[in-house]
Amino acid sequence: MAKKSQMAANVAARNRKARHDYFIEETLEAGIQLYGSEVKSLRSGRASIEEAYASDEGGEIYLINAYIPEYPASRVQHETRRPRKLLLHRKEISRLIGGLNREGMTVVPLSIYFNKRGIAKVELGLAKGKRKFEKRASIKEREWKRDKARLMRERG
């Protein structure tokens, strides 16, 4: 339990809608190639990965459309939405590319965080998109679980 709370304190960006919009079938951790001003900006916690996804380009995986704002005190600025290379082992890359080639599958970032050593990591999820009725069903199920827990607390 202590590990989760420690990781929560180091989260720079979280994709809250990912679990609502997708069925997450598999998760894995990847390093991310960043400039110094991007790391400083991530530490301030102003990044957004809501519209981001991972893509295969030439046998490597890149994080596309992740927004990391410019760091105000830096002289040399970076592009805010540039493609960022994800650092993975060859087996992980081939597994993700195989997943991307299946119909309806995508790779979405779930969170960007700093590990114990202070290195930026991305939690990726191999995901399949939900349809509208599936989203409604998951909301209904979540509300029923909440109501059931409330009833059990009241009864004793």
Image: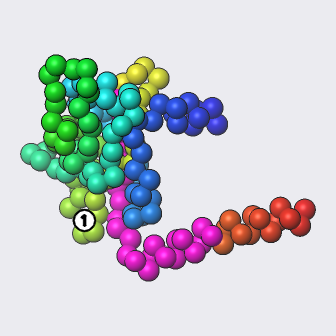
Task: Give the residue at x 26% y 43%.
Answer: 67
* Residue 142 shown in magenta: yes
- Is 156 left or right of 30, judged from the image as shown? right
In front: 87, or 95? 87
| Disc 1: which residue | 102
Q: Quadrant of the C terminus?
A: bottom right
Residue 26 pos. (x, y %): 40, 53
Where residue 24 sits in the image (x, y, percent)?
A: 42, 58
For image coordinates 45% across by 73% down, the residue present is 135
The stretch of residues the image draws in magenta is: 120-143
Q: Is residue 6 above or below residue 134?
A: above
| Closer-to-camera residue (13/96) | 13
Say what secondary structure mark 1 lies in: loop
Residue located 75% across and 64% down the image? 149
The answer to whether residue 29 is visible is no
Q: Is residue 64 left or right of residue 25?
A: left
